[in-house]
Each structure stands twice: as structure tokens, then as C-alpha cells.
Image (cartoon, coloured by chain):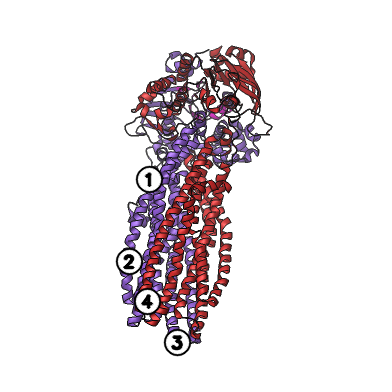
Chain colours: A purple, B red
């Protein structure tokens, strides 16, 4: 669906036109051969239309002078027939081939943009509005498509017919051509003046439309809150304000947009009239032939048409170039850093994982001796901030033995989620080090690292597709039985069986037909099916009610038993059995130890925990 | 369609003058070739220069009248279509404001927004196009045909053959192309949801290293879109060659038969030129009609979606309320045999036969697993939904007898899915009380434990919240929503799982301040955490739409199996023992 905010589309003038055009051309290169054919067809079409009208001259002259006979007429009509046929055929092929070329280019542009999106770091998505990225795929690519579909051919054929018509005019009658030469700058000036004004109003209209649409979207999204607060009348009052502004701005924009036609039409009619009058006088005084006058008058009409059309196309071209620029801006974003050349990877053999040290990597030569993968995580003095100068984590040091469960607790914003962002390199740390089995994660190939760290996040995300497909996302080659097994581990099996089509139930729009708790269970199942030896649970059961959570506890324990697990949880009851609990505050670990030790310390954890039980 | 007359009536002058002025353009366009023929036939043939100049003068005059008509026409057409759309949009928005919760549930937010924005714009564009071309295209068609017949009836009969054939051909193209375009639109939607999904699920994709998998899925959707696009476009591009074919064949026919007539001396040469111009005009106007047709078929779909909103029956109003003047002074709540289901006639009841009573000033906790009907239960109190059977009484009066305004003003409710609006923090809090001064606002914020973090922002209460409050954390957002509800000074305050993202210590503070400052207010609190409701005067335990137990914490622990299970799932047995 095109976003409701398409009104916010940037109609500003493109900044670096030449470069943008150059980059766009690259998308046409794959069809170079076909473009040549298109070009050829466009020329044939334009020429045949010129020739067709030029043919009228000898016919009319022949008829006017009375020299012509039926045979002459038949011959002429036959020649015209051939010319027209060529024009029609070339017109059809030109359109058909060009559509293919344009669609190919758009397909390539979209694919490359999507591929690029896959390579961007998480930081990009955290700091950019998704709606904005979306609109580059939709509005901006569409704007480019509009131009490729129509404008390109129109420009070529427009230029050809302007040049061709002009030469024929000169050839037919030099004096009459002067009228057009004089009229031309006037036409351009009038058209340009209207276009300039209309663009100004158009921008104001788009801004007002954007504001109104934004207000509608916000209010309708919060409609239930509006009702609870009896805010309907105020909402209508605010809305009327935006609506009134839009009405005023639109009137200017649509009016100036609308008079382009009549004004340009008027200019070309003046041109037509002057040509007719002067031509008529020339016929009388200097013996200019009637056939010549007829075709000339037709030329002067033909001449102004492409100019009108091209001036109408200017907006399309501007917004296409602006759109292309926005698309290329994404293409130019910095990607996730490349893996080091001698990066280690983790390979699976007979269900067990091993380190694979590439030849020439002497730093980790010792790993060749004992390549077994143990999933031991060590954070040494890790410091990190999302923005320079704003440190979120300060000097974090911790140690997770293989198979251990480490829990993080602390208030919102203490930096719990940030730690999990660092382990699979969604973000790279500034100082300190994170190692797995003694290997710095910067020295592991990113794909290998991530394949071995399964995550269950608080914000549940599912894909359009069946329940089965969603769980299988964790391991694409899993059999149906394995999927069901994973669902059982996550205690999702029973609710899935109650769905209308069981595992084949289609999930629409991020699983909107499931409750938040059910979505979380599916996320857990997805992590369960992946064989990753490291597991990160970030508030993985926050929306599952505590009774259900109790029920899935055994499954979760089974899931965590074979894995090194990092858990973040709000409910302290869920982290009690962790091997170690880290209490985070303002990016620092202020307490650590197991549940009992921390309670005995009577520090922050004790307070948090007893805060939970203070009312007993 | 009748309902749309009211959007035309206030602007009828614009709706009438727009097309009429456009006709002057048509008249001019039809007349100019006629004058041109005069210049050739009479002026050039009889060597009459003054005649040529005088005709030229008439032509110039015509051109200017045409321009004036065109400009005036586009002014009125713009005014008419814009006014129509603005009034329509306004009515739509008002209608949505009247919507009950049930009405809102039946439309998805996205589709409502599209109806109010894109669909209205679509209709507006077609009206504009229609007003400009409504009389123009048929006018030109008829005018040109008439002129052609006046000039030369024999030649004009060619048009009678060509026009139906061309109309048939264009009609066929549209008929074939239209369903193909709908297929393409579906593919576009599918592609867009792929992109949307890839954007929101970026962490999942990366953590499972599924970039290539996603690329393949996308490439497949993309190729699909291209194929369906080509299928649609390949038909539409036939329009142009068909048009050219018709034009050229007609020209040839005119030249051939006209030429014979000229040879026979029954037709002046100048007429031949004018005639070819008329042919072009006739065919152009047919093209224009086809375009309007294609556009308006899209607008009809939009109009249908708009009508759906306007025709929605508001199923919850206070029109029949008996005691519109009654105001709530105490805040007692009583349910008597209330049953409810979201879909009429569905057997599965969300609430069945609920009865209980809450005294003014009491604190009541409601607990139970997800989907057991807690939210539905409390939403009956401010009459967000109406009971199917039984009734809800506030201060002894059936809620259906209060005016909605009085009822909802006295019931403060913090929804589970709550939203903040763009504007400053103070703007948002003032939703509770438009005229609140800073002191009152600060007091409410501090009662909701929001004052501290608000003060930590550099601009404090003037901090701008972006839409949906994305620049505050979940817990902060919930506290702002509580403060906003407190500003209403409600007699009954309902918190629907509104502290789930607030940490336990802060939540305890909020409860403490409620106990101190809201003694008179009836407080109903839905919670997941048992600690949130443990000290309530009463706890209602719900299970599958029924009340499983009601009483104090101790009573519930002793009597209610479900409650004990929830309690044990959250408490360490050893610690609590």
C-alpha cells in the first residue's frame, strides 16, 4: 500500500542532476541493443508522421492546379499508406520494447535497493524512519518508472519532431518560419512563468496535504484514546484547520496547473492565426502555393505540440530525478564492515561445531589444536555508546562458561538490550573485547557468528506465511517433525493445534491474528529449532502470562540446558535460577552473583526483589 | 449516489460554470479550422488581402476568448472539485469521530487512513478531470462531426464508420487491460508487504543470517510484479497504434474520396485541409473519453470504499439516554448479569453472566490469564461496548442512561494499547483537562511518577513528543498516559495493564501515591503481576469470561485455585513460605 504520507514527497529540485542521470543510465545498459531499436523506431515514427503530412502538399497542389488525375491521386494515397503503416508499426514496437526496457530497469533498481538494504547495519534501521525507507521503494521508484515508461520516449520523439518540423518549415517557406521563431521564446516564457508559479503552489499544496494526512493518520491510530477522553470535538476542530489550509493551497496549485493548457493553447493559436494570415497574404502577393500553406499550418500546430508536452513533462522529470537521488542515497549508505580476509568460521560436522582457522592465520593457530566449539563468552572491559560521546555501557566485564545461564536485570535504559546487540555484532564495540572460546568476535566471519547465536526478542516479529514456515525460519532444512518438536519445546504446539489449519495456518501481517503471547511462543520455537549453541533471550516471555510461563518453564529449561544463554527479564522470578545475575545500572554492573548471594548482599537486587514481595 | 448531491449543492455555480466555460474552448477549436478554410478558399483564391486580415482578426479574438474560457473553466473546475473533496473528507472525519469501539474494530487503521486520504484524492482528481472534459470531449466530438457534415456530408459519412469501430477497439483494450491492472496492483501490494516485513524484521533476518533467503524471496516477488506489469502494459500500448491507425485510415479515405470530389470540382481544396483537422479532433476527443473512463473506474472503487465508511451504522450512541443531565458524583460500579460477545450471534462469549459491586473509593484488582476478558470487562464501564445481556450501573444508574460525555468525563481510563500524540508533553497531558495550569499538570505527573524523568529532559514539559511517543521508553510512556488520565480528575480510574513496562519499585510508588491522593476515586486495576493487585480491597479473578473468585488477597489464596496457581507461578515458594 502506498503510504498515506505520499504527500510528504520531496518535490525539491534534484541536486546533482548530471550524476544522477549518469547512474540511472547504468540501469538501462543491460538493454542497450533494445534501446537502439527503440531509438530507431522513434525516429521512424516521427519521420513518418512528418512525411505523412508533407505528402499532403503535392496532393493538394496537384488537386488545386487541376493537373492531377485519378492515377496521381491513387499513387499518392498508396505512398501515404506505406508511410503510415511504417509509422504505426514502429510506434507499436517502440512502445512495446520500451515498456520491457523500463520494467527491466525498475526490476534491477528494486532488486539492488533491496540487496543493499540487506547489507546495511542495524544502526541504519534504528536511526531511520521505516516509512521513509518504504517510500523510497514505492513513491521514488514509481517516479523513476513513470519517467522511464513515458518521458524518455517523449523527449526523443519530441526533439526529433521539433527539429524535423522546423527543417520542413524552413524548407517549405522561410518567411512563415520567422513567425514561429519569434513566437517560440514567447511561448517558452509564458509556459515557464506558469510552470514556475504552479510549482510554488504545488509545493505548498504537497506540504499542506502531508500535514493533513499526518494528522488523520495520527488521530485515527489513536481513535480509541480520542473516544476515552471525549476529545472528538477538539479533533474535528483541529482537522478543520488543516482541511481549510489544504483547500486554500490546493486552489492555487490546481488553478495554475490548469491554466497551463489554455495559455499554451492560446499561444499556439496565435501562432496558427498569424501563420494563416501571413501565409494567405503570401499566396496572394508572392504566389506561395496553397498546398504549401496547408502543410505549413499543420506544421505550426505540430511544432507547438511537443513543446507543450515536454513542458508538461517537466514535473515528472523533476520528481523522477529527485526520487532517483533518494534511492541512490540509500545505495551510498555505508554497509556492514566486511569480514577480515582471514576470519575464522564455525563449521558443523556430525551435529558438532568446530572452529575453522583459515591458512595463514597465525594469531589463532592454537585453535587448530583444539577446534571444538565450546561457546564460552567473555566480555573484557567493554565500553559502547550508540552516539559518539553518549556512553551506554561502561567497562563491562563478564564471563559465561559453556552451558551457563547469565541474567541481566535493571531498570529500563540501564543497557541490558545493548549488551545483546553487541554479541552478534549488530553494533561494534568501541573499546574492550568480546571473545568466544578465546576468539575475538571481530575475527569471526559475521555469518558464522550470527548463525551460532539464536535470539528471541521482545518485539515479536513473524513473516507472512504458514506457522510451519515461520518456525522453520530458524533452520531452513528442518523436517516437519523437527518443527513440531521445536513447537512442543516452546509450548506452542497446543495453541497451534487449536488454530483453524494447525501448522498450515497462514499468518497475516506480522501475525496479527495471534495474541502477543502466542507470537512470543512462536519466536521461541523458531530459536529452538536452530541449533545455535548460544542463546539470547531479551524479554522473551514478557507477554506470556505467568501461568503459561510456568507451564513452558520446563521446555525453556530444556532449551537452555545445552546452550550458553544470556537472559534479560523484567520478572525477577524468571531469572532466579541463573548461574549468575548481573544487576545493571546506568551502563555499569553494580552487583553480580547468584540469587542467594545477591539477596544476602542486601543491595539493589535485594531492593528490587523485595520490592516485588514487599506487600506479603 | 444521492448522498453526494449535498457536496455539489453549495458549489453548484462552480459545477455548472466549469464545464460551460470549457465549451468556449471547444467552440474555438472547432471554429478555427473553419476560418482557416475560409482564408484558403476565399482569401487566397480571390486574392483578397483585407478579407484575409479581417478573418485573422476574428481568429485572434477567438483565441483570446478561448483562453479566457479555459482559464475560467479551470478555476471553477478546481474550485468545485476541491470543495467537494474538502467537504467529503470533513464528513468522513466527523463520521470516524462518531465511531464506537466496535465500529473502529471492524476497519483496520490503515484502511481507514487510506479512505480518508488517498481515496478522497482519487475521487477529487476524477471530478476535476470530469469537469474539464465532461462537456469538452463530447462537445468537441459533436462539434467536429457537425462541422464535418456541414462542410461535406458525403465525406463525413466516413466518420460514421470509423467512430464506432474505434470506440469498440478502445473499449476492448480497456476491458482487457483493466483486470490485468488489478492483478498488477495486487502484486505491488505483495511486494510492498515484503519490503515492510524485511524492514521491521531486520534483526531476525540478520541474526539467522537469512539475507540471501530474503533476497531470493524478494527477487521472486519482483519478477512476478514485472511479469504482471508487462501483461497489463502490453495491452494498453495498443491504444496509440489503434488511434494512429484510425486517424491515418480516415485521412487516407478523406484524401481519396475528397480528392476525387476536388477533381470532379464539387469541393474546394481548402475544405480538404479543414476536414483532416476535424478528423483529428474527433479521434482525440474519443481518446479523452477513454481516459476519463479508465480513470473513473478507479475512482468508483475509491468511492465505494468511502461510502462504506459513511454508511457505517454507529451502534453505540446516547440518543435514547434517559438521564442526560445526570452526573456521576460518587463512583460506585455494579455489574448485573452482564454477558457480551464481540460478534453478534457468535456462540463464544467473551463475558458470561458477570455480577459484582464496587463501592466508591475502593481499589479493585482484576487478574487472569491473557484472553480471559479482563479488558472487555472494564471497557463496559465507560460504555466503550454495550452489554448483550444484563446491565452496568454507575452510581446506581444504567450507563446507557448517561450522556456519553458525562459518563466518559467521569471515568478515567488508561488503555492497554495506549498512544501519545505529537506535540509537547504538556499538550499531551492537557488532553485530560484543557484548562489545566502548570501546577495541576505537575501534580498529576508527580502522582504518576513521571515528574522526575520529565524534569530530566532539557525542555521539561515543553519536550516535543514525536508521533506515538517513540522518543520516550515504554515505561515512561505508560506513566505519561497515567498522568494524562489523572488530570481528568475522574471518579472512577481504570488502569488496563498500564504499568507492565514500569519497574516494580516505581510501580509501588505509583500505588502509594494513588492510596494517598486518590482516596475518593474508585480504582480498578488490571495487572499481570500479582504484586500490583495484592493490597487491593478486592481482587476479581477471571477465567474464560467468568469470575473465578472475588475477595481479598488472603481470601483468594485460601479459596481460589486459579489465584493460587497464578500466585505460585510468580512467587518463590521458599521465600513466601
Label ID, residue A66 = 3
**Front position in the image: A481 or B210:** B210
Q: CA distance from mark 4 to mark 1?
A: 70 Å
Magenta run includes residue A139: no
Q: CA distance from mark 4 to mark 3?
A: 25 Å
Q: Disc 4 or disc 3, which is closer to the eye?
A: 4
Q: In the picture shown, does residue B423 fall above or below A180?
A: above
Q: In the picture shown, does residue B482 fall above or below B185?
A: above
Who's the residue at 55% across and 45% down the image? Answer: B306
Q: Which residue is mark 1?
A: A333
Q: Position of residue A457 (x, y in %)?
A: 49, 33
* Of pointers 1 and 2, the one earlier in the residue sequence: 2
Q: CA distance from mark 1 to mark 2?
A: 45 Å
Task: Determine if marks 3 and 2 fall on one subunit.
Answer: yes
Task: Determine if marks 1 and 2 fall on one subunit.
Answer: yes
Q: Chain of mark 1?
A: A
Q: Residues within 10 Å of mark 3 (few under 14, many from 20)?
A: few
* Of pointers 1 and 3, the one earlier in the residue sequence: 3
Write the start and end of the magenta stretch as one range.
Answer: A555-581
**Front position in the image: B163 or B54:** B54
Are the residues at dot 4 and dot 1 in contact (C-beta closer than 8 Å)? Answer: no
Are the residues at dot 3 and dot 2 in contact (C-beta closer than 8 Å)? Answer: no
Magenta run includes residue A564: yes
Q: Is residue A458 at least partly visible in the picture? A: no
Q: Chain of mark 3?
A: A
Q: Which residue is mark 4?
A: B51
Amino acid at each position: 500500500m502506498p503510504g498515506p504520507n505520499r504527500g510528504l514527497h520531496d518535490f525539491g529540485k534534484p541536486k546533482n542532476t548530471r550524476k544522477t542521470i549518469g547512474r540511472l543510465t547504468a540501469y538501462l545498459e543491460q538493454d542497450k541493443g533494445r534501446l537502439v531499436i527503440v531509438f530507431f523506431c522513434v525516429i521512424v515514427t516521427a519521420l513518418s508522421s512528418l512525411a505523412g503530412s508533407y505528402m499532403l502538399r503535392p496532393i493538394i497542389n496537384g488537386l488545386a492546379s487541376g493537373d492531377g488525375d485519378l492515377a496521381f491521386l491513387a499513387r499518392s494515397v498508396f505512398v501515404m499508406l506505406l508511410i503510415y503503416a511504417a509509422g504505426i508499426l514502429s510506434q507499436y514496437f517502440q512502445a512495446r520494447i520500451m515498456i520491457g526496457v523500463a520494467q527491466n530497469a525498475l526490476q534491477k533498481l528494486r532488486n539492488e535497493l533491496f540487496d543493499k538494504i540487506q547489507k546495511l547495519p542495524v544502526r541504519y534501521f534504528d536511526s531511520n524512519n521505516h516509512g521513509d525507507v518504504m517510500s523510497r521503494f514505492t513513491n521514488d521508484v514509481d517516479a523513476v518508472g513513470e519517467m522511464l515508461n513515458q518521458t524518455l520516449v517523449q523527449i526523443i520523439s519530441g526533439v526529433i519532431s521539433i527539429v524535423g518540423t522546423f527543417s520542413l518549415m524552413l524548407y517549405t517557406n522561410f518567411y512563415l518560419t520567422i513567425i514561429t521563431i519569434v513566437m517560440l521564446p514567447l511561448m517558452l516564457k509564458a509556459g515557464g512563468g506558469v510552470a514556475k508559479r504552479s510549482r510554488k503552489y504545488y509545493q505548498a499544496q504537497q506540504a499542506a496535504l502531508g500535514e493533513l494526512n499526518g494528522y488523520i493518520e495520527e488521530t485515527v491510530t489513536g481513535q480509541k484514546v480520542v473516544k476515552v477522553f471525549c476529545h472528538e470535538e477538539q479533533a474535528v476542530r483541529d482537522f478543520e484547520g488543516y482541511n481549510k489550509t489544504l483547500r486554500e493551497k490546493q486552489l492555487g496549485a490546481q488553478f495554475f496547473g490548469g491554466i497551463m493548457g489554455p495559455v499554451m493553447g492560446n499561444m499556439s493559436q496565435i501562432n496558427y492565426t498569424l501563420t494563416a494570415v501571413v501565409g494567405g497574404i503570401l499566396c496572394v502577393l508572392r504566389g506561395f502555393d496553397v498546398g504549401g500553406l496547408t502543410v505549413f499550418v499543420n506544421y505550426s500546430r505540430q511544432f507547438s505540440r511537443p513543446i507543450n508536452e515536454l513542458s508538461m513533462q517537466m514535473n515528472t522529470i523533476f520528481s523522477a530525478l529527485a526520487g532517483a537521488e533518494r534511492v541512490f542515497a540509500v545505495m551510498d549508505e555505508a554497509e556492514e564492515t566486511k569480514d577480515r580476509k582471514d576470519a575464522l568460521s564455525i563449521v558443523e560436522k556430525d551435529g558438532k561445531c568446530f572452529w575453522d582457522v583459515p591458512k595463514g592465520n597465525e594469531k589463532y593457530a592454537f585453535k587448530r589444536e583444539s577446534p571444538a566449539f565450546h561457546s564460552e563468552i567473555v566480555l573484557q572491559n567493554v565500553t559502547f555508546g550508540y552516539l559518539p560521546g553518549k556512553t551506554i555501557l561502561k567497562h563491562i566485564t563478564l564471563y559465561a562458561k559453556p552451558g551457563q545461564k547469565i541474567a541481566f536485570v535493571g531498570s529500563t535504559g540501564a543497557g541490558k538490550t545493548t549488551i545483546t546487540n553487541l554479541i552478534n555484532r549488530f553494533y561494534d564495540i568501541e573499546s574492550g573485547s568480546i571473545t568466544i572460546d578465546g576468539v575475538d568476535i571481530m575475527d569471526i566471519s559475521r555469518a558464522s557468528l550470527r548463525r551460532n547465536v539464536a535470539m528471541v526478542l521482545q518485539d515479536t516479529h513473524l513473516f507472512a506465511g504458514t506457522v510451519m514456515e515461520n518456525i522453520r525460519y530458524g533452520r531452513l532444512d528442518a523436517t516437519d517433525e523437527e518443527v513440531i518438536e521445536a513447537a512442543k519445546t516452546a509450548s506452542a504446539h497446543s495453541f497451534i493445534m487449536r488454530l483453524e489449519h494447525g501448522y498450515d495456518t497462514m499468518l497475516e501481517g506480522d501475525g496479527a491474528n495471534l495474541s502477543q503471547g502466542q507470537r512470543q511462543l512462536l519466536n521461541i520455537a523458531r530459536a529452538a529449532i536452530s541449533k545455535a549453541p548460544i542463546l539470547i533471550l531479551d524479554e522473551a516471555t514478557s507477554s506470556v502470562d505467568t501461568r503459561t510461563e510456568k507451564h513452558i518453564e520446563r521446555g525453556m529449561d530444556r532449551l537452555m540446558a545445552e546452550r550458553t544463554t544470556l537472559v534479560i527479564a523484567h520478572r525477577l522470578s524468571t531469572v532466579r535460577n541463573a548461574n549468575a545475575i548481573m544487576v545493571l545500572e546506568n551502563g555499569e554492573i553494580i552487583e553480580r552473583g547468584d540469587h542467594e548471594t545477591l539477596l544476602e548482599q542486601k543491595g539493589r537486587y535485594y531492593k528490587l526483589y523485595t520490592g516485588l514481595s514487599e506487600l506479603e | 449516489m444521492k448522498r453526494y448531491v449535498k457536496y455539489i449543492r453549495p458549489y453548484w455555480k462552480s459545477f455548472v460554470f466549469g464545464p460551460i466555460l470549457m465549451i468556449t474552448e471547444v467552440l474555438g477549436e472547432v471554429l478555427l479550422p473553419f476560418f482557416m478554410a475560409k482564408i484558403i478558399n476565399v482569401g487566397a483564391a480571390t486574392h483578397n488581402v483585407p478579407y484575409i486580415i479581417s478573418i485573422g482578426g476574428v481568429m485572434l479574438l477567438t483565441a483570446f476568448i478561448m483562453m479566457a474560457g479555459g482559464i475560467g473553466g479551470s478555476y471553477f473546475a478546481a474550485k468545485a472539485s476541491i470543495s467537494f473533496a474538502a467537504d467529503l473528507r470533513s464528513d468522513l472525519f466527523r463520521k470516524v469521530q462518531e465511531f464506537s469501539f466496535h465500529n473502529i474494530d471492524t476497519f483496520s487503521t490503515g484502511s481507514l487512513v487510506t479512505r480518508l486520504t488517498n481515496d478522497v484524492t482519487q475521487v477529487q482528481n476524477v471530478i476535476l478531470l470530469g469537469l474539464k472534459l465532461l462537456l469538452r470531449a463530447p462537445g468537441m466530438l459533436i462539434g467536429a462531426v457537425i462541422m464535418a457534415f456541414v462542410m461535406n456530408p458525403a465525406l463525413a459519412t466516413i466518420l460514421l464508420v470509423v467512430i464506432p469501430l474505434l470506440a469498440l477497439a478502445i473499449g476492448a483494450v480497456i476491458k482487457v487491460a483493466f483486470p490485468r491492472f488489478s492483478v498488477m496492483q495486487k502484486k505491488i501490494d505483495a511486494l510492498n508487504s515484503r519490503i515492510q516485513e524485511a524492514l521491521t524484521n531486520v534483526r531476525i533476518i540478520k541474526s539467522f543470517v537469512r539475507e540471501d533467503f530474503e533476497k531470493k524471496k524478494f527477487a521472486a516477488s519482483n519478477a512476478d510484479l514485472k511479469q504482471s506489469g508487462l501483461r497489463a502494459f502490453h495491452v494498453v500500448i495498443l491504444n496509440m497504434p489503434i488511434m494512429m491507425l484510425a486517424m491515418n485510415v480516415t485521412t487516407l479515405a478523406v484524401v481519396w474520396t475528397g480528392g476525387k470530389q476536388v477533381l470532379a470540382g464539387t469541393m474546394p481544396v481548402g475544405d480538404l485541409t479543414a476536414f483532416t483537422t476535424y478528423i483529428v479532433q474527433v479521434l482525440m476527443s474519443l481518446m479523452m473519453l477513454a481516459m476519463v473512463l479508465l480513470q473513473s473506474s478507479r475512482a468508483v472503487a475509491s468511492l465505494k470504499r468511502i461510502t462504506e465508511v459513511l454508511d457505517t451504522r454507529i451502534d453505540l450512541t446516547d440518543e435514547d439516554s434517559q438521564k442526560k443531565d445526570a452526573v456521576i458524583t460518587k463512583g460506585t460500579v455494579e455489574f448485573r448479569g452482564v454477558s457480551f460477545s464481540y460478534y453478534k450471534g457468535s456462540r463464544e462469549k467473551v463475558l458470561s453472566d458477570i455480577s459484582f459491586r464496587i463501592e466508591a473509593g475502593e481499589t479493585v484488582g482484576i487478574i487472569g490469564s491473557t484472553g480471559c476478558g479482563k479488558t472487555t470487562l472494564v471497557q463496559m464501564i465507560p460504555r466503550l461496548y454495550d452489554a448483550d445481556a444484563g446491565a452496568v450501573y454507575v452510581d446506581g444508574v444504567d450507563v446507557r442512561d448517561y450522556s456519553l460525555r458525562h459518563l466518559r468525563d467521569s471515568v478515567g481510563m488508561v488503555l492497554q494499547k495506549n498512544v501519545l500524540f505529537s506535540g509537547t508533553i504538556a499538550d499531551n497531558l492537557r488532553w485530560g483537562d484543557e484548562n489545566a495550569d502548570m501546577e495541576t499538570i505537575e501534580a498529576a505527573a508527580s502522582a504518576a511518577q513521571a515528574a522526575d524523568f520529565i524534569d530530566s529532559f532539557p525542555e521539561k514539559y515543553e519536550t516535543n513528543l514525536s508521533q506515538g511517543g517513540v522518543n520516550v521508553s515504554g515505561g515512561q510512556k505508560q506513566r505519561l498516559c497515567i498522568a494524562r488520565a489523572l488530570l481528568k480528575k475522574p471518579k472512577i480510574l481504570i488502569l488496563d495493564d498500564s504499568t507492565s513496562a514500569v519497574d516494580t519499585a516505581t510501580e509501588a510508588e505509583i500505588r502509594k501515591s494513588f492510596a494517598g491522593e486518590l482516596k475518593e476515586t474508585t480504582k480498578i486495576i488490571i495487572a499481570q503481576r500479582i504484586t500490583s493487585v495484592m493490597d487491593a480491597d478486592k481482587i476479581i479473578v477471571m477465567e474464560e469470561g467468568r469470575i473465578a473468585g472475588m475477595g481479598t488477597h488472603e481470601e483468594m489464596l485460601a479459596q481460589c485455585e486459579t489465584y493460587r496457581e497464578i500466585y505460585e507461578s510468580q512467587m518463590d515458594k521458599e521465600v513466601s513460605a
